[in-house]
Amino acid sequence: MATILSFAAIFPLNTLGHYIHWHWFYISVANLTVIILMIVTFVAALLLPFPGRRRRKENQ
Amino acid sequence: MSNAEIDRQWTTRLRRRVEGKLPPEKVLPDTQPSYVASWIYVFGVATLASLGVVIFTGCVLALRGPQWWHGSQYGHFVNSLHLWSVEIFFFTMVIHLWGKFAMAAWRGGRTLTWMTGVVTFLASIATAFTGYASQSNFDSQWITTQAKDGINATGAGAYFNVLNLGQMLMWHIVLLPIAAVVLTALHVILVRIKGVVPPFEDDVKLAAQKVAVGE
Amino acid sequence: MTKKAFRPDVDAPEWKGGHTPYDIIKEGTIALLVIALLTLIFAVVFGSPDEAAITIKSWSNADPIDFATTALSELNGTSISASYGAPYNHNGASQQIGPLQLAKWVGVRIPINSAQNFVIEPLKALPNEPTLDADLKQYSSASSSTQTGWLNAYAKASADMKFVKGQVVVNTTNAGPVPVMINDLTTMARSGALDQDLLNDNGFYTTDYTKPLLFLADSQYLGNLATEQHLGGDQWGMMNETGNYPGQAWLWLYTFWYQIPPFNQSGNGDALVWAVMMVLSVLLLLVPVIPGLRSIPRKLRIYRLIWREHYRDSGGSS
């Protein structure tokens, strides 16, 4: 029962971090991933079609 | 009691003012303008939802005290929930900020909506900082011993002692969440009162006419 | 009615167009469920970091020479906390921004006397140490020039400091009671008694870790561990987290200034960075009332993507 209900993380990120160093710019892979994901999400939010177009046209 | 007397009461005046600015159909609207047709609009409610999860997971952490998560796998799991909900909170809030900037969402008398949003953002950073300071592990030892220099330089360090775990924890679980929730509530109320900002008008002359005749 | 000039970046006519049905409660509920699910997934997959706190005990056992060297710097007033200035003491010039010496004006509110708080008083607390007590008396009753002479002799010889069979060994004969004080403090630290002593000033119950944290922060040990984890100030450390976890990406601009001159070369670097961030925060707050800044969205034209359906349906031109 204890092993089935183990709350340990599947892929704990406890190993020493990976970093990208370019001139004086220095960022962790994790942070860079988050920032890239934010930009991708923002762009996707702008570009992806929003459902309900027919309903909006009907209500104009 | 005369009607005039009832009309003069603080309670009556406040209720009428609130009803005027925020009638039930504005608090819980059942329609929205047809120009609200983009996924960018979900990030406001996503931020709100994240804040709810942050507060809920924080409350669960509080049940067993600030050291629970170091020794218990269940406590550690709740800590993980709290950490990731905070990451998602900032993720959605910043995208919400980008979207609202792109829309110039302060237009049409919505300056205060923008401002409450910015103050909430800044208060969230302060709340997150006190959270990191409250972890009672190596990370909090490093963060607080470094952050003290910046805060000391402003003079605030004499009273806001980041090396005082008890003070940081109480700011984190009492004072700053109250501030964050109050600011968020003000922000959302303003959105409900003013409505979502309309698109930029292509025809500036037409827009000028509409504003001039009080549309 | 007098016509007011229309300002496209400030004004917006009230919407008189169509509305569509909107279920705000359903939207909120879905958002809550999605966010809760995402949180759960990330927590289950990645967990969270928890690098154990260092104690003075673990530090002094891992690096007794660094501990002894730090203890010396507390005693001779050369450590960071000893010479910090406000709010801890009057021994250093606090940071300032031009004529603004905010920390100094507020004054010393968290008094720290490094020599007394970190070395002499903890040693005095040790029971049944008649030799140490005599050495402490000798130190305290000596003139400041004598004390300085002892400390300088010890400091000079400490370049060759060794740790042999549990003893701090420094080859000097002109340092008076200082070698015994430093050695006994190191032993006290290694036993764990110093951790507790630095806290119990405030009584049985305390949550104020100012003293042990200042002592730790004066060491090389803490900084070295932080540098290993990429948390140093010159490593954009403020944004980072231990291990491979994402940190505080939203602090990117705050930590950026610490990487470039003049901030990374100035003794007032922290004050300058705070001043810059205060100004930028106020600018962000006041965007709606700053001409030029508030025009950027209209010029960027990202809004044409957001409201493309509206512009298409209303026959708007780009």
Image (cartoon, helix red, strand yellow):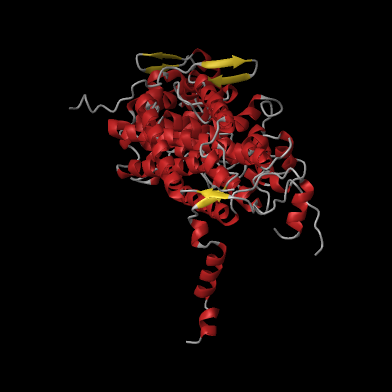
Q: Quadrant of residue A1?
A: top left
Left or right, B4 with reference to C49: right
Farthest front residue?
A: A58
Residue C64 rendering spot, x and y as whole percentages: 42, 19
* Number of numbered discs on residues: 0
Instruction: Name the foreground residue: C293 vs C229.
Output: C293
Determine if residue C137 is in view. no
Image quarter in which the C terminus of chain C is found? top right
Q: Is residue C154 above or below residue B126?
A: above
Position of C142 relative to C281 (above/below): above
> Image point 49% across, 53% down: which residue?
B30
Image quarter of the N terminus of chain C: bottom right
Q: Position of residue B92 (x, y in %)?
A: 51, 36
Kindly identify the residue that appears in the image at 62 percent across and 20 percent down: A25
Please provide percent x and percent y for residue B181.
48, 50
Which residue is depicted at the point 81% across and 59% down? Answer: C3
**Residue C209 sits in which quadrant?**
top left
Nearest the viewer among B207 and B196 is B207
Asked whether the viewer can see residue C164, the reply is yes
Quadrant location of residue B209? bottom right
Q: Nearer the viewer, residue C15 or A2?
A: C15
Q: Residue furthest bottom?
A: B2
Q: Is residue A48 above or below residue B105?
A: above
